[in-house]
């Protein structure tokens, strides 16, 4: 499966954005997925994960209550609704396919593949 993230942009502190992760291939519907983010000079970090059916989700504490991960398997697309954005949310956001199976815990990049080009989010103060 190939993934392409989009929807990033420049937004003010407290604003909102919705990111999309479009997939190619029907196998998208079979996989758990996740969003990660990365700032220059730092490792890519886990943001949120979702089961293949969409009925299970998990978030890093930093975004809990502000971000919502979802998916539409009919459109083979995953989303990340980001509200109450903060300057520390500034990063390039990537979507990845889970190759190990959904877990309710922080995950590392080695457990995901099919990273596509990310989408840049900049939150100004």
Image (cartoon, grey):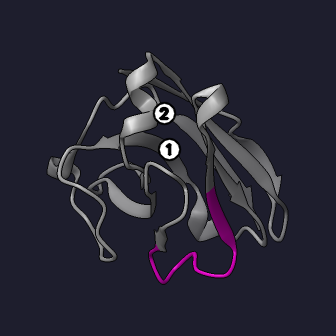
Q: Are marks 1 and 2 in contact (CB under 8 Å)?
A: yes
Q: Nearer the viewer, residue 17 or 102?
A: 102
Q: Residue at x 31, y 53 (%)?
A: 44
- Element under label 1? strand
Q: Does label 1 or label 2 sit earlier along the sequence?
A: 1
**Range of magenta residues:** 59-69
Q: Please identify the quadrant where the N terminus is shown.
A: top left
Q: Residue at x 45, y 20 (%)?
A: 26
Q: Which residue is mark 2?
A: 118
Q: Which residue is mark 1?
A: 92
Q: Residues within 10 Å of mark 2 (few under 14, many from 20)?
A: many
Q: Is residue 60 magenta?
A: yes
Q: Residue at x 30, y 52 (%)?
A: 41
| Location of residue 104 in the rendering, given as x and y in whole percent from the top left corner | 34, 76
Q: Is residue 25 magenta?
A: no
Q: Please identify the quadrant where the C terminus is shown.
A: bottom right
| Location of residue 38 in the rendering, given as x and y in whole percent from the top left corner | 40, 51
User: Is 103 left, or right, of 67 in this rendering?
Assistant: left
- Element under label 2? loop
User: Is 9 left, or right, of 44 in this rendering?
Assistant: right
Q: CA distance from mark 1 to mark 2?
A: 6 Å
Q: Nearer the viewer, residue 96 or 123?
A: 96
Check the image and report above or below for 101 versus 23.
below
| Location of residue 35 in the rendering, given as x and y in whole percent from the top left corner | 46, 51
User: Is 84 left, or right, of 44 in this rendering?
Assistant: right
| Location of residue 98 in the rendering, given as x and y in whole percent from the top left corner | 28, 47
Q: Nearer the viewer, residue 28 or 120?
A: 28
Q: Nearer the viewer, residue 44 or 102?
A: 102
């Amino acid at each position: 499966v190939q993934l392409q993230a989009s929807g990033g942009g420049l937004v003010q502190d407290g604003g909102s954005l919705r990111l999309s992760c479009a997939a190619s291939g029907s196998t998208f519907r079979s996989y758990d997925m996740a969003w990660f983010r990365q700032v220059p000079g730092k490792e890519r970090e886990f943001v949120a994960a979702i089961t293949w059916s969409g009925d299970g989700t998990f978030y890093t504490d930093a975004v809990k209550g502000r971000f919502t991960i979802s998916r539409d398997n009919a459109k083979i697309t995953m989303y990340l609704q980001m509200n109450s954005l903060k300057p520390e949310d500034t990063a390039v956001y990537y979507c990845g396919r889970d190759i190990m199976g959904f877990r309710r815990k922080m995950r590392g990049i080695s457990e995901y593949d099919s990273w596509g080009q990310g989408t840049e989010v900049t939150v100004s103060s």
